[in-house]
Image (spheres, rainbow, N blue to C red):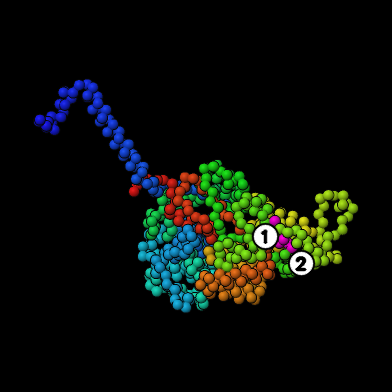
Amino acid sequence: MTIPKIKQFKYISHFLESRERLCIKTLWLVIFLSLIFLSVRFYFIHLKLLPAKGGEYSETLVGNPKYINPVLAPANEVDLDISRLIFSGLLTRDKDQKLIPDLAEQYQMSEDQKTYTFFLRKDAKWHNGEKFSADDVIFTIETIQNNEFKSPLYSSFKGVKCEKVDDEQVKFILNEPYAPFLSLLTLGIIPKHLWRDFTPTQFYLAEYNLKPIGTGPFKFKSLVKEKNGVIKTYILKRNDKFYRESAFLEKFNFKFYFSYNEAIRAFKNKNANGLAAASEALSKETFNYKNFDLHSLHLSQYSAIFFNQSNNQFLKEKNIRQALSYAIDKERIIKEVLAERGEIIDGPILRGGLGYNSEIKKYRIDLDKANQLLNDLGWIFEESTAAEQESEGAVKFRKKGDEELKIILTTVEKEAGNKTAEIIKESWEKIGVKTELQLIPKEIILKEIIKPRNYQALLYGVILGPDVDPYLLWHSSQISEFGLNLANFSDKEADQVLEDGRKIFNPDTRHLKYQHFQNIMLEQMPAIFLYSSFYNYLIDKKIKGFDLENISLPSDRFIDVEKWYIKTRRGF
């Protein structure tokens, strides 16, 4: 038998019948389709869907940028948010809130825990192409330490000595060990070559405050102003020369609104991909928008009623403060005000924080106990008048002799209403404590109410920050108008515990110190601790790569922003 040569195969059709030719064509078609099927199957099974460069993200913010400058930004949440994307610090936090190197490659701490040496990255550059160096770090810290610049961070770096070792090495020297110090070094660094010639007055007026140059994953592109000069839109673009892997998103836009109602309306009308707010600012309906993912983030903050005993003699009595606490239905606040997106708290240490103890005494609503405490002090309900007896809903208040038991409750006037304050007023009046609400606009509460301590009971929310050091909120040195001790709390034992806690680096020992502090607080009861609300972040479902559960500051939602993406590609 002779085997045909390859070139002879082209004549094979002349020797086949039509049925045989059809079979061969069908066979070739099957083989061709099988190859296509196997190729497609291989593509989808073995090639993964991977993030790709490109895409644009827009977020609504309430307020306006003023100083997108890390030296000044802490005074304004909008500035902090944008600064987080444009600037970098020596350290940053990962998604688990652990400190990791950023502009620093590594650092060393001396044996006496008072000297920190940082070794800087060699590949970091400013957005204008200039090289980042130790001079920029020194300049940033010295600017903060110069009180003429009035940086909100002045007290944090007071007494810290910063020295240049060489262009790629800096040294921080402290007077004594300070455990939370490293948390301060997430501060964004500003470029010396652009800022060094500005006087303190010029510093605030400089164009770089709105058109900044940083080292972060995004850089300034443009801004849009309304006719009255108010910034309407702020546009960032990807920093392709970022020292780590550059971001996937091409642009990052912010759109500014005067109120949460306006921001929510814009978000609902799909004018933005993201909306961030504490639970109090959002309604239950907001959480149910389709095509958006809701991320309820645990934020290191809490809301409490801080008692200023100097301005109300009744509040000096601990049993009265206890009665006021037993009167409040915290669970009702969680349901009606926070749409169940928050947690009840019982002390100044939040769940998961150093010193947290789930077994501490808990104040839950107990009207019988509240009434008994006031009865034991001789505060009795005043007798009803004839007119009041006819009125079924008349509220009766307690008196002792000619004195009426009354309190003024002060809080920030909120656009979404002051439901929490109204619930507290209603609760206190149920046990016979006459309560007057004082609602203060957000713009003036710091200057006119908080700094001069011009209140009797203050309903207010505080952010603890990255290191949950209670010192700034509760040490007696912070009672002055420049401090944050809102309850004017002064206790020698508590002061000593807080001072010791700052110097201890061993987390177990520090934990025990703060447990002791929490017990002192519950015994002294300078405040009623109410709740910690979640920080809610609604993001368009098309935005991928967001993976956070806990944040220390609202701007921490941009941790790992380089990993966010919209577009995808196939690859191994």
To which residue does mark 1 refer? Answer: 459
Labelled disc at residue 472: none
Which residue occupies 46% across, 69% down? 139
Classify residue 389 as left or right of residue 108. right
Chain-order first, disc 1 or disc 2: 2
Give above or below for 484 relative to 83: below
Asked if the stretch drawn in magenta spans residue 324, the answer is: yes
Label 2 neighbour load within 10 Å: few <14, some 14-19, many 20+: some
In the picture, measured across the screen, residue 34 lies left or right of residue 470, that is: left
Q: Nearer the viewer, residue 482 or 181?
A: 181
Crowding at dot 1, Cα within 10 Å, few <14 / some 14-19 / many 20+, comes out as many
Q: Position of residue 53 (x, y in %)?
A: 39, 48
Q: Residue at x 58, y 46 (%)?
A: 287
Mark 2: which amino acid? Phe
Q: Image quarter for residue 309? A: bottom right
Q: Pick whichever, 107 or 238, lies toward us.
A: 107
Q: Is residue 37 above or below residue 509?
A: above
* Residue furthest top in the image: 18
- Location of the N terminus by quadrant is top left
Residue 31 visible:
yes
Q: What residue is rendered at 43% in x and 58% in y?
A: 216
Q: Is residue 427 left or right of residue 280?
A: right
Q: Quadrant of residue 156?
A: bottom right
- Mark seen at residue 314: 2
- Disc 1 and disc 2 in contact, CB within 8 angstroms: no
Magenta segment, which residues? 323-329
Q: Is residue 315 left or right of residue 558?
A: right
Q: In the structure shown, which secondary structural element does the residue marked by tag 1 occupy?
A: strand
Q: Mark 1 to mark 2: distance in Å?
A: 17 Å
What percent of the width, then of the height, locates residue 171?
43, 73
Q: Amino acid at mark 1?
A: Leu
